[in-house]
Image (cartoon, grey):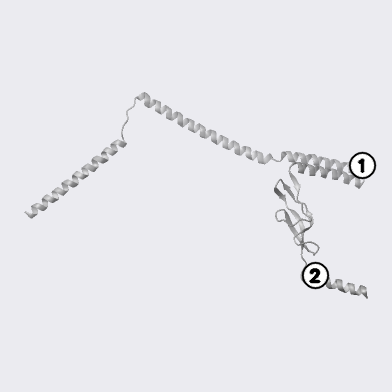
Amino acid sequence: MKDNSEDVQKQKGSDEATIEEMTDNDSDSKIKHKKDKIIKVKESEYQSLENEIAQYKDKHLRLYAEFENVRKRMERDKMEFAKYANVGLIAEFLEILDNLERTIAAAKAKHQDYDAFEKGVEMVMNQIYEMLKKNGVKPIEAKGKVFDPHCHEALLQEETDEVDEGIVLEEFQKGYSLQDRVVRTAKVKLSKKKAVEEIKEDVFDFERGSEEIAE
């Protein structure tokens, strides 16, 4: 009797599991059926949708191709601009070069004296300075100014007690800036404080000289 009772309970549990599995499968089937729901449309409407999709795809491809063409054209224009950006400046320099060549040729042909030749060269230099100024190029102030590493380049230092340390004493080569950007730094010589021993030696030499004069 006990064995029969256990068999009945096992069979009952198995039946319940089968029912639950069937229920789950049925639910999954309904969900899948909802996902795969078939919508019936007329053939003419289907064809119209196909044509509309094809039109949108064609427009997309055309817009993409046009965008690529514009991008390539902009890159090409940018390269052309960078390549020929200084054409106007070079043209002005060529005019100045012409004037300089004419000045030298005239000096050689007429055997002009040095003063006349110097005056002609100065006129050409003034023309260059005016052209640079017109294009936003100006010389960087250096001599007598406090050393600025952004626009000055120190090549030498000279010990002195006549000025403070770090003052530009001499300019070897002019520096230039374009608007607010440094094109070329000025090559300069800076002041440097004398060593204490040297100062004492100078004072001693001065006092000794004064004593000799007094004697």
Residue 17 left/right relative to 161: left
Between 99 and 3, which is closer to the camera in this rendering?
3
Q: Is residue 133 left or right of residue 111?
A: left
Q: Quadrant of the C terminus?
A: bottom right
Q: Residue furthest bottom?
A: 215
In this view, which residue lies farthest toward the top? 44
Residue shown at the point (22%, 42%) measured from the top left: 23
Is 60 displayed left or right of 205 in the figure?
left
Element type at mark 1: helix
Which numbered disc covers residue 134?
none
Side of 12 relative to 150 (left or right): left
CA gap, disc 2 and disc 1: 58 Å
On screen, 29 above or below 164?
Answer: above
**Please, is residue 194 above or below residue 147 in the view?**
below
* Foreground: disc 2 or disc 1: 2
Q: Give the residue type that dot 2 points to.
A: Ile
Circle 2: is it few (<14), some (14-19), or many (20+) Cα within 10 Å?
some
Q: The residue tagged with tag 2: helix, strand or loop?
A: helix
State the residue at coordinates (66%, 39%). Answer: 81
**In which quadrant of the rendered view does residue 99 lie?**
top right
Q: Badge 1, how many Cα within 10 Å: few under 14, some, many 20+?
A: few
**Residue at the spot 43% in from the left edge and 30% down from the top edge:** 53
Q: Position of residue 200 (x, y in %)?
A: 80, 72
Q: Position of residue 3 (x, y in %)?
A: 9, 54
Name the quadrant of the N terminus: bottom left
Rendering coords of residue 61 (x, y %):
49, 33
Residue placed under numbered mark 1 in the picture: 110
Q: Which residue is mark 2?
A: 199
Name the residue at 45% across, 30% down. Answer: 56
Q: Amino acid at mark 1?
A: Lys
Q: Earlier in the sequence, mark 2 or mark 1?
A: 1
